[in-house]
Image (cartoon, rainbow, N blue to C red):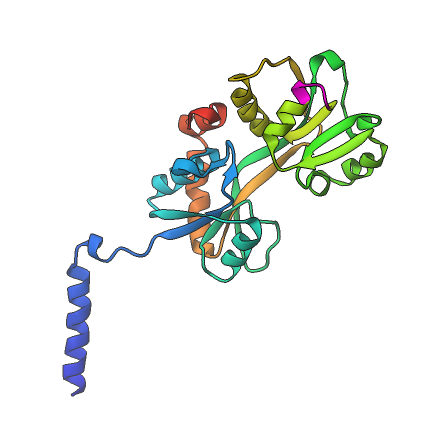
Amino acid sequence: MPFILGFFIVFALSSYAEQPSSERLEKPLILATTAYIPPYVIESNERGIQLSIIRGAFDLGQLGAFKVEFMSNKRMVASLLNGEVDMTINAPDNIEGIYYSEPVLYYENVAVALKNKNLDLRSSANFNGLSVFAFQNAASFLGKDFSLSINKMKSYDEVVNQMAQIDHLMKGWVDVIVIEKRVFNFYLEEYKKTHRVDEVSIFTIFGQAPRPMAFRDKILRDKFNVFLLQFKQSLEYSAMLDSPTNL
């Protein structure tokens, strides 16, 4: 009986090995992200700089297909922790048991003012007496100096709708907007289609923020890092960063 059982196990494994790979493909990986962070992530057609770079690294390394699922930040983190998804974009730092990749790219938050205001913004201290319109949760993201400067501003508001930031700036309703640089350029191009725009000054006072991927599996993270670094040396990667509206 043991001999017969062993024979059938070997036969079954041999038959599996002989099947075409298409018949035994593993279930696609699942990448979770929030739905709309243009130009980084755009739900329609699953476009955006970050998605394109991640696909480029996966394709280069033949790491397999992945499915994109869009969800809130809170659900994204919970889904990563409980194993419903395999990897995420823009997960919070220092989640225990999660493996972070090398930066896919860097975000750069900036202060933007109309050029005719003649402002010279070199640090958060220069916001004193100004009306500032920032992205949601900017006070939490931009560090202690910025947070402390809020009480000395003429007014301070945060908003989810970043097109509203462009509109308020161009209409002179606020002195300064605080926004990620490529996000600003993306929305400015959209705004130009229907509105006149004035020249602006962009102040790079907040530094760059690395944006890694977060993985549940260390081996997959390690493989992704290898091919991400290779992809970042390519002209394709440079083109994605330089022409985000063409993705």
The quadrant of the rendering that contains the C terminus is: top left
Q: Is residue 92 above or below residue 122?
A: below
Picture coordinates of residue 100, whole percent (x, y): 53, 49
Picture coordinates of residue 158, whole percent (x, y): 70, 36
The quadrant of the rendering that contains the N terminus is: bottom left
Picture coordinates of residue 30, whole percent (x, y): 41, 52
Picture coordinates of residue 177, whole percent (x, y): 69, 27
Q: Is residue 140 above or below residue 205?
A: below
Total tally of numbered discs in the picture: 0
User: Which SS type dominates the magenta stretch?
Assistant: loop
Quarter of image, res 195: top right
Tell me which segment is drawn in magenta.
169-173
Query: Can you name the residue that lies furthest to the bottom here?
Result: 1
Horizontal side of 124 relative to 33 (left or right) equals right
Residue 237 belongs to magenta span = no
Horizontal side of 53 relative to 63 (left or right) equals right
Residue that appears at 66% across and 39% down: 136
Asked whether the viewer can see residue 173, the reply is yes
Q: Is residue 216 above or below residue 152?
A: below
Q: Is residue 152 above or below residue 224?
A: above
Horizontal side of 55 relative to 179 (left or right) equals left
